[in-house]
Image (cartoon, grey):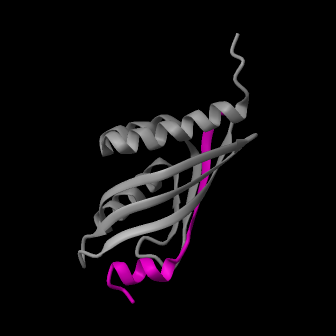
Amino acid sequence: MDAQSPAEKNKAVVAQFFDANDRSFDDLVEMIKATVDPDFVVAQAPGLPYGGDYRGVEGYLEVQEKIRSELLDLSVEDLEIVAEGDTVLTMFRMLGTSSSTGNKYDMRQVEVWRFRDGKLVSLTPFYYDTHEIRKIVGLA
C-alpha cells in the first residue's frame, strides 16, 4: 500500500524535475513529456526576453529552449521544496551566464507548481528582480 500523500508525491515529482535538469536537457524533456498535463500553462513575467504564457508540453519545451538560449550554464543552488496538497513551492538561486553579454546571472526565485491528478497543470515563476535580468541579458 502506498502511504505517500498527494503532497509528498507532488513534491517528489518536482524534485525529479530539478534532478533531471541537473543531468541533461534530454532528461528534462523526458520528464516534461511524462508529467505535464495537456492543459498545462507556464506564465513567465511579460518583461523578460522569454516572457508570456506557454501552453502544453510543446509550450513548456519552447520556453525551456528560450531560457537556455538566453542563459547558459544554468544551475540551481539552495533549493527548498515545500508542498501542501496539489501545490508545491520551490525557492532557490538560479545561476548562469548571459549568452548575449557574458554577464553572470545569480537570481533568487520562487516557483508555484500546481498539480491535478498527479500531472503538472501550471508553473508560475517569481523572480526577485526582473529588471536585473533584463540588464544581465543586455535589454536595459
**Residue ranking furthest to the right:** 85
Residue 7 occupies quadrant: top right
Q: Is residue 122 covered in magenta?
A: yes
Query: What is the x, y in percent for residue 32?
Result: 46, 42
**Nearest the eye: 33 or 136:** 136
Q: Is residue 25 above or below residue 74?
A: above
Query: What is the x, y in percent for residue 130?
Result: 50, 77
**Nearest the eye: 32 or 131:** 131
Q: Is residue 32 visible?
A: no
**Nearest the eye: 19 or 78:** 78
Q: Is residue 95 above or below residue 104?
A: above
The residue at the point 44 percent across, 37 percent down is 31
Q: Quadrant of the N terminus?
A: top right
Q: Is residue 54 left or right of residue 62?
A: right
The residue at the point 72 percent across, 18 percent down is 3
Q: Is residue 13 above or below residue 135?
A: above
Q: Which residues are magenta?
A: 117-140
Q: Quadrant of the C terminus?
A: bottom left
Q: Is residue 125 covered in magenta?
A: yes
